Image: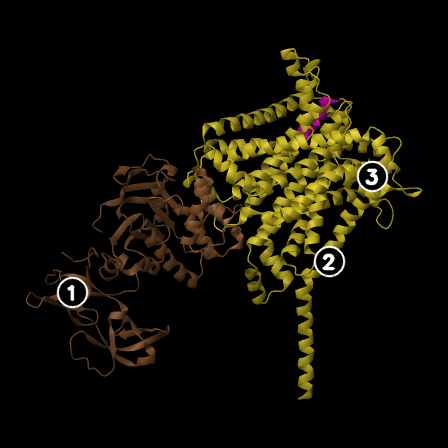
Chain colours: A brown, B yellow
Amino acid sequence: MGDEAMLVVNDVHKSFGHVGALRGVSADIAKGELISFLGPSGCGKTTLMRIICGLTKPDAGEIILEGRVINDVPPDRRGIQMCFQNYALFPHLTVAGNISYGLQVHKWKKDKIKARVEELLHLVQLEGLGDRRIDEISGGQQQRVALARALALAPKVLLLDEPLSNLDANLRVHMRATLREIQRKVNITTIFVTHDQVEAMTISDRLVVMNQGAVEQVGSPVEIYEKPRNEFVAKFIGYVNMLQGVVKDTSDASRSAVIDTELGESEIALGDSRLSRGEKIYVIIRPEAIRLDIRKSTGPMNSFAGSIRSVMYAGSTVKYTVDVGGKDLIVDEYDPTTHGIRRMGERVVAEIPRNVHILRADSRTPVLT
Amino acid sequence: MAQARALSRAAWARENATEFIQTHVVNIAGGVLFLLLAVFLLWPISAVLVKGVYGPEGFTLRFYERFFTAYYYRSFLNTLLLGVLTTSVCITAGFCIAYLTTRGPRFLRSPLKWLTLLPLIAPPYIFALSIIMLFGRRGFITQLLNLDLQIFGFTGVVIAQTMAFLPLAYLIIENMLTSLDSSLEDSAANLGASEGKILRSITLPLLVPGFLKGSLIVYVMAVSEFGNVAILAGRTPFLAPDIYTIVTGIETDFHMAGTLSMFLLLPVAIIFLVQNYFYKDKGYVTISGKPSYAGPRQMGLLILIPMMIVALTEVGLIVLSFAVVAIGGFTRIVGIDNTFTLAYIVDWRANHALVSSLRVSLLAGLFGAALGILIAYVVVRGKFKGRGAVEGLCLAGFAMPGTVLGIGYLLAFNSPPLLLTGTMIILVLNSVFRFAAVGMEAGITKLQQLSIEVEEASRNLGASTPTTFRRVVLPIIFPAAMYGFIYVFMTTMVSLSAVVFLTSPAYPLVAVFIFQWAHSGYIGLASATTVKVIAIVAVCLGIIQVMSRWTGFSITGEIKGRYGG
């Protein structure tokens, strides 16, 4: 995102009584970008949203929109529109009445309102439902009405607070795509708040992972998944196998190192990491990166003998727990229909890849230079 | 083989019978409750209305004819106007105060709320007493400012009734405002609406069902709780005191009383029907599942100041009234002989009535709460047709002008098989069936929050329906029962409109005593006794509060989350 930042959150602090809800949060959001704020419940996401749109005042720090500090601008003058988690649709108004509410407040002309409402209904694929009452439409449709209402005044920034959490699983996946499509079409800068990591990964240009009122990592979904900056991010996004280890040897020539791990000796590629001998580290391995084999001997490095301790079949994958000398590894194997499903107690060889992510053991932060 | 089959068939039959009884317990209870409601509400009410069209000669409209030829139609118009004025002022002012205590400055919320609710523990006609002592010909303020006021008449009555029933309106509206999802208002603000615009376009329209409900209750109270009216009306006629005079006067005329009751009831029935049929399913307030937290909103001065004026006037008048009644109870003759006296407070005549009132109110509270909760359970969990009728009947009892129900009891239970006149039972039953709806509504709210699966889990673990009710449901709806108890107890202690017809020398009621003294001009005695009643109700509430700490229930918490109907 090389563009100049549309919205800057600069070192925002907020506490409620003794509870620190936000402890210095900063983030830059580019124009037209969809950025997700992701974190467990109570990490301060919603508080941050309310601060950005002006419903809550920060104790310290700045919110900067298009280069202008807007801390003291009232919510209705910010050009930032929030979509509430429960939609907050006005139950006594029709679909069209809801969508046009902001336009009426801003004293638009009748015919312009009508045209705009039609345009928005078309955008969110609710043509012809303008006269319906709010309780006569489905949850997914309510979600789209809320979106249309928020977009009506063409805000500079759209805030979506857990917008899909009230929908059932299938509808969620569908609405995720719809939401992204609409966001791209309108090209609106959007902040998406969620605690669902799959949702955040699939929908966003970038993610901001938050925990306990602070930002843990900002990056693209790929960066966050493949190069988590710390243990929290690694564990919050998907499952990880974490192996303790000590650097036994490094080779500058082959850009590799030998690590004495809990499983045994493994050789890993260093990439742009720099390790020194005797250093304590964690090796981070995603379940799908480990390969299981029964024919192979344990001869080569990175191959360890073990046995299957549990089998969880999930259609497209099978999740195995493999006991390797007392340490449990979680391994995902794809396409079980072709490969067959392994049995409990079966002897296998687990092969660990050379390209892994490494965190320092003391600070549990990456060893990237 | 055959033997085994016979055995299993017997077991199966036994099992099936238990199953049958268990699944039908709720329905059977529903039937019993319906019968009870029919006997103790429907029958008395019909008895009154039939009297109006049924003379010794059979069906007749001559009583209705007399209604229009005598002065009674003026009573009707006065009553209608009184009801409409009182209700409008109560709802408007109640909304202002409720808006302040839910959206206004934080430090104001709690004191404003408790002061506004204070009159609930006092007899409504405390305001007739205070108005006489403040603005009467010898009143404190009249003398102080040398005014020439005429408080006896329409104006005085409207002021007193408004003061008396504003807390009720406030309680209902406050509850509605609290449960209104604040993200709706946030969202409107976020779309650029000003506070005034939000009020007009969002808050007020969403409260319409609450206003209707509040109007119904306040209207009924204003036209039927006739203590203030009888004391202050002077020569202005009103229906409820007319009925009282007709029934308790020298020439008792139940036919005319029946006719007047019809006219007392008519407007109430219309509001009741509108509320129940046009707005029943438009309870917007609960549409969202998860209420977002209500941050303190900055109220604009243009809205804050007028609302504050209303609130402070109301609270000021309440405090003034309580103070002046307290003073009046210890003053020989207010305005004429302002010397201190203990004569009224030690007057023994009221003590017997106080004890008797306390007994009736406690019993009514217990049974009223129990009945309300039972009906709530049956209405929410029963599967039989006519659940709506049970609920509606119970609510109709609450919406019934007390005067009408009082005469109804007098007529219906005056002969075998249910000869109850002159007993304590009739007093208790009257209050129980009149106010059971309060416990019922609170219970329904609680039960609707309780997923049926919790009960199914209990049954699945082997508990029978009664056991499930006792072990699972009861603890959860206990707060609702408690609320029902408190409401029935408090109201029975101070209400006059129905029991005034049912009280007897053996079971005198303190509310009736105070009313009769005030009516006859014994202001000091009436004030002192009012002070005693307030003290006793306050002490009882205190005891309940302390006792209920053991169970984790809090009066303040419950009243906060509920309303008076």
Question: Where is residue A39 shown, x and y percent of the image?
Answer: 33, 53
Q: Residue furthest left?
A: A253
- Indicate which label's residue lies in the foreground, 2 or 1: 2
Image vertical order of residue A238 relative to residue B362, above or below: below
**In contact (CB < 8 Å): disc 2 and disc 1:** no
Q: Which residue lies furthest to the bottom in this view?
A: B1
- Residue A227: x, y in percent? 22, 60
Residue for badge 1: A246
As shown in the figure, which amino acid type bears the numbered disc 3? Gly
Instruction: Please name the residue that numbered disc 3 is placed on.
Output: B258
* Residue type, label 1: Val
Looking at the image, which is closer to me, B345 or B29? B29
- Quarter of the image for the C terminus of chain A: give it: bottom left
**Magenta region, main secondary structure:** helix
Same subunit, labels 2 and 1: the answer reads no
Question: What chain does mark 2 sit on?
Answer: B
Q: Mark 1 lies on which chain?
A: A
Q: In this view, does B190 lie to the left or right of A347?
A: right
- Identify the residue position indicated by label 2 in the image: B31
Q: What element carries label 2?
A: helix
Q: Are the residues flagged by discs 3 and 1 from a single subunit?
A: no
Position of B353 relative to B397 (above/below) = above
Q: Which chain carries label 3?
A: B
Q: In this view, does B339 lie to the left or right of B349?
A: left
Q: Can residue B177 be seen in this view?
A: yes
Residue at position x 34%, y 79% in the image: A337
Seen from this angle, which residue lies furthest front?
Answer: A111
In depth, the one of A26 and B552 nearer the eye is: A26
* Label 3 SS: helix
Stretch of the chain drawn in magenta: B522-533
